Amino acid sequence: MKHHFLIVILLALPLQAAFELSGSNAFSNAMGRSGVTNQRLFAAFLLNPALSAGGSATNIGLSYSKPFNLVELSAANLILSTSFRNVGLGGAVYSFGNRQYQEVRISANVSHRLLQDRLLLGVNIHWYQLNFAHYGSTRAALGLDLGAYVRISRYVSTGFSLLNINQPALSGYREDLPVVTTWGIALQPGGGITAYLTVEKDRWYPVNLSFGVEAPVTRYLVFQSGYQTNPTLPSLGLRLRWNWISVFYAFQYHFQLGPTHAWGLAVSKKK
């Protein structure tokens, strides 16, 4: 009966389709889904494929989260990114669920810097796979994302992405994974503070607005906070950094389903 319980939980989520939680990790949860313009975040290429070209370091990160505090719904991520000259590269492996129901996504990214770093363009390719152990079945599909980032000035930047633009079909029906259109803006007023606003829309659900902010508390500690409107998800988090090692913690709260905790460890080597 346990596998039936898990499937009921998944179907009960007001926002849930397959891979709906694939963007959930310790690196981005604290600011909701507002990372479409977050050039500082090495994992942000999963929300906007263009952003890997804006990095100046090689990064490897591991993340573990418990959506709604249920061990049966645990999610793990391995994320890598680097850049050289005008090219950015990224890769990620995501696993969600358990032996009864499991989602696996393998991602590859490439992006390019243009116009003296004012314009970034990128693409992601994903392999999506669903495993149903009890029914002995597996479903798979390829997904394609496109993204762009524009630095308008020293203080303002904007980003745009189209996720699942090829309408992946896991069960033979187009848009099993819906096309998601995202636009965002980032403001840097000074003092190391950055504020983010993102508007997200797919075919199935109403518009989701995401707000995020990050601010340095000390040389080693960064505070992050965010809020999403659909579903309503307040969030906060901390990043502790020492030389080339960073430790992340993120907390989100769903008013019907409860809290989600995420922990992450990243190694970054600047070039």
Image: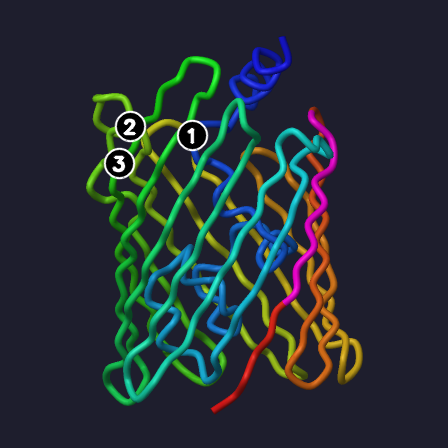
Callout 2 secondary element: loop
Going from N to C along the chain, the mark reached first, 3 or 1, is 1
Q: Position of residue 110 (x, y in %)?
A: 28, 68
Work out whether mark 2 precedes mark 1 in sequence or the reverse, and give the earlier one: 1
Residue at 26 percent across and 36 percent down: it is 141
What's the magenta region? 257-265
CB within 8 Å, label 3 to label 2: yes
Mark closer to the chain start, 3 or 2: 3
Determine contact: label 2, label 1, CB under 8 Å: yes
> Which residue was labeled with disc 3?
141
Looking at the image, residue 14 sits to the left or right of residue 74; the answer is left
The three-letter code of the residue at mark 3 reads: Ala
Disc 3 and disc 1: Cα gap in Å?
12 Å
Q: Nearer the viewer, residue 155 or 258?
A: 258
Q: Dot 3: what SS? A: strand
Residue located at (41% from left, 56% from top) = 46
